Image: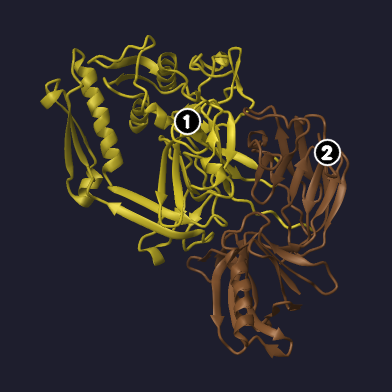
Chain colours: A brown, B yellow
């Protein structure tokens, strides 16, 4: 079963009976793509190639949906077909510029946690084929280079205490950290300096309020680090705290596959994370 | 085992003119170009989406409410990722953003920006004496003076008369290393190099900027000037103050760099790290018989000639003549000698014509800038005669 979260009608279920028929995903018409962005030169005057550093695109998913009344009967009545098309086109169209957490495609995985593409948008507008069965094909995409577990985990990182976080997925994940919070409760003291260390990768993120223009994270507030966007804002959308990042000594935190030994020194923090899959 | 991170090779960081940090432009800057030039200003450029919050948010910290990315009121550092241990990033460029261009099409707008290091800014600072007087028709003369002192004195004079220049030349606390280390309006932490040679007589014409005067000294072969970028957010000590907006520290060499024979660029020879190479041999500027005349029409005492007979034998005579109206005055002998030295320089440089080699290295295989070689270094470039008409090496 797939669920499409969207601004138009909240959620739409695929592959199960609804009061408006069944939106049936056709396996042959569905794809999940991540492109490899590659640059290659030929070795001059010799056989072989020079492979330059490669990167991944975000994710793209094409969905092909057949419209059925029941599992045994296609949606052939004009009234039902119109209702199903309106529901689907409204949902898909509303994803055109869906905001943060407004668009999401989730699906069940046998024997594992539900997964999703987060922050999706409409990439290719729906194309309707009358059929029978009536069929709609459209494409969505996400900025993230992975799918992720549907359920987000909040793990408290007490000051100076190493905590192991296990990314059981197949891809590295770029988490969000809320510094001066512990298990959702914001600290009552200001935070002047802190370091986040991933002992598994040896990578560190360093913040100091002593840099020009930098400020302490005030008591009763937290600094939210978005590792994908590479930003740090007070309470997620308040004051820009970027001036406090030690530019020479910081890499934004990431969770590699498997165990990650995370330590925050100088503050408590919560890390918001999911296993990533691709 | 964790996979190596693949961060961008470069990131740019913006601050206001006081050095107060604003934002880093990681992940949104495309078309990044960092151009490093010997004896000229370094430039850094890139393009960002105009609608990104890292670009358009007004910055009130300096009282102007310009957008984060703005012209004339932003310093921009360029950091290069050269290590997987701290410090991950090394400062390789420090500039003042002096060009911002917004371009929109139907669906989106992009903002291109360029920053130049303070040498470019010094093109907007006139040469003055210590009291701020502009040179008169006789120019500003230095006699029997170390070239590094000339360079730094021009800097100190413009700092004294027109304000901070973002360039650190030291505060004189290293005086024990030579008289060229004086209080040039810089910091206690200055770590540059000021050569004690050559010593020369030099005249700077009326109307020259500090940046142009430096360029003239370099073009005349008297020195190489290197502005090393620095990023020290906790500040450098100037008197009793911590200054957080130095962009570069200056070094003056008789000749910068060293020869690195083991750092090879090659096309069809071992290494094979050049994915493109171009050689131009230009004989149109060849000179093997140069006549220099001191004074307008040689009025200061006739001509000085330099000839390369081997070149004439091979190519035939290529003759050039030049007059120096400024070489006049009472010391005729000195004027003619000066013209003669110039003639010899011209022939030694131009007797075989000019060869220009440009090439495109594959960064994964070739010597790495800043790590394997530095600005001013001399490195071999190889191509064999069998595939490239004539051997290059």
Mark 1, Cα crowd under 10 Å, few <14 / some 14-19 / many 20+, is: many
Quadrant in the picture for residue A10: bottom right
Task: Give the vertical position of B286 relative to A127 (above or below).
Answer: above
Task: Give the vertical position of A247 relative to A108 (above or below).
Answer: above
The residue at the point 65 percent across, 78 percent down is A30
The answer to whether residue A84 shows anywhere in this view is yes
Residue A155 % position (x, y)? 84, 49
Residue A69 % position (x, y)? 69, 84
What mark, if any, has residue B5 been given in the picture? none
Q: Nearer the viewer, residue A16 or B290?
A: A16
Q: Nearer the viewer, residue A134 or A252?
A: A134
Residue B54 % position (x, y)? 56, 43
Q: The disc numbered 2 marks a residue on which chain?
A: A
Q: How many marks?
A: 2
Q: Is residue A3 left or right of residue B253?
A: right
Label 2–label 1 contact, CB within 8 A? no
Residue B147 % position (x, y)? 41, 22
The residue at the point 64 percent across, 26 percent down is B234
The answer to whether residue B393 shows anywhere in this view is no
Q: Is residue A85 left or right of residue B122?
A: right
Which residue was labeled with disc 1?
A: B73
What mark, if any, has residue A268 been given in the picture? 2
Q: Say which quadrant the N terminus of chain B sits in.
A: bottom right
């Amino acid at each position: 079963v797939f669920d499409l979260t969207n601004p138009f009608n909240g959620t739409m279920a695929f592959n199960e009976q609804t009061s408006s028929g069944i939106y049936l995903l056709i396996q042959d018409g569905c794809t999940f793509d991540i492109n490899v962005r590659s640059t290659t030169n030929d070795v001059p005057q010799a056989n072989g190639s020079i492979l330059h550093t490669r990167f991944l695109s975000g994710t793209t998913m094409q969905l092909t949906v057949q419209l059925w009344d029941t599992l045994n009967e296609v949606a052939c009545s004009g009234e039902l077909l119109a209702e199903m098309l309106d529901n689907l086109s409204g949902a898909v169209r509303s994803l055109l510029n869906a905001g943060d957490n407004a668009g999401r495609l989730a699906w069940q995985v046998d024997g594992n946690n539900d997964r999703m593409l987060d922050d999706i948008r409409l990439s290719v507008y729906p194309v309707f084929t009358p059929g029978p069965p009536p069929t709609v094909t459209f494409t969505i995409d996400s900025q993230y280079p992975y799918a992720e577990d549907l359920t987000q985990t909040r793990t408290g990182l007490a000051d100076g205490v190493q905590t192991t976080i296990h990314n059981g997925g197949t891809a590295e994940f770029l988490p969000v950290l809320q510094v001066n919070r512990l298990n959702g409760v914001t600290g009552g003291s200001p935070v002047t300096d802190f370091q986040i260390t991933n002992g598994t990768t040896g990578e560190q993120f360093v913040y100091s309020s002593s840099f020009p223009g930098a400020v302490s994270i005030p008591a009763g507030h937290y600094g939210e680090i978005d590792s994908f966007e590479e930003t740090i804002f007070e309470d997620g959308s308040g004051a820009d705290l970027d001036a406090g990042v030690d530019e020479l000594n910081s890499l934004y935190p990431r969770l590699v596959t498997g165990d990650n030994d995370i330590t925050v020194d100088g503050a408590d923090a919560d890390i918001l994370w999911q296993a990533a899959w691709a | 085992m964790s996979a190596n991170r693949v961060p961008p090779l470069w990131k740019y960081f913006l601050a206001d003119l006081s050095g107060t940090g604003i934002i880093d432009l990681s992940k949104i800057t495309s078309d990044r170009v960092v151009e490093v030039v010997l004896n000229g200003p370094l430039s850094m450029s890139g393009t960002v989406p105009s609608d990104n919050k890292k670009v358009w948010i007004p910055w009130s910290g300096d009282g102007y409410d310009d957008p984060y990315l703005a012209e004339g009121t932003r310093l921009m550092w360029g950091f290069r990722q050269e290590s997987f241990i701290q410090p991950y990033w090394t400062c390789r460029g420090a500039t003042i953003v002096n060009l911002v261009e917004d371009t929109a099409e139907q669906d989106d707008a992009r903002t291109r920006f360029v920053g130049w290091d303070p040498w470019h800014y010094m093109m907007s600072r006139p040469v003055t004496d210590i009291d701020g007087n502009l040179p008169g028709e006789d120019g500003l003369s230095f006699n029997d003076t170390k070239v590094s002192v000339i360079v730094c004195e021009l800097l100190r004079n413009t700092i004294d008369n027109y304000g901070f220049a973002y360039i650190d030349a030291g505060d004189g606390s290293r005086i024990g290393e030579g008289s060229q280390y004086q209080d040039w309006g810089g910091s206690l932490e200055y770590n540059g190099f000021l050569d004690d040679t050559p010593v020369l007589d030099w005249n700077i014409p009326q109307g020259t900027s500090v940046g142009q005067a430096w360029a003239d000294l370099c073009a005349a072969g008297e020195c190489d000037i290197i502005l090393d970028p620095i990023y020290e957010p906790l500040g450098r000590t100037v008197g009793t103050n911590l200054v957080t907006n130095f962009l570069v520290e200056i070094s003056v060499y008789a000749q910068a760099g060293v020869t690195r024979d083991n750092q090879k660029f090659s096309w069809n020879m071992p290494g094979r790290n050049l994915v493109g190479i171009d050689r131009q041999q230009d004989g149109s500027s060849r000179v093997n018989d140069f006549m220099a005349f001191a004074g307008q029409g040689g009025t200061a005492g006739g001509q000085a000639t330099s000839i390369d007979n081997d070149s004439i034998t091979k190519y035939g005579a290529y003759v050039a003549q030049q007059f120096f109206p400024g070489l006049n005055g009472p010391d005729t002998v000195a004027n003619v000698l000066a013209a003669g030295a110039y003639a010899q320089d011209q022939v030694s440089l131009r007797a075989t014509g000019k060869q220009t080699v440009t090439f495109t290295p594959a960064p994964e295989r070739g010597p790495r800038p800043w790590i394997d070689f530095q600005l001013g270094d001399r490195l071999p470039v190889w191509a064999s005669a069998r595939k490239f008409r004539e051997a290059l090496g």
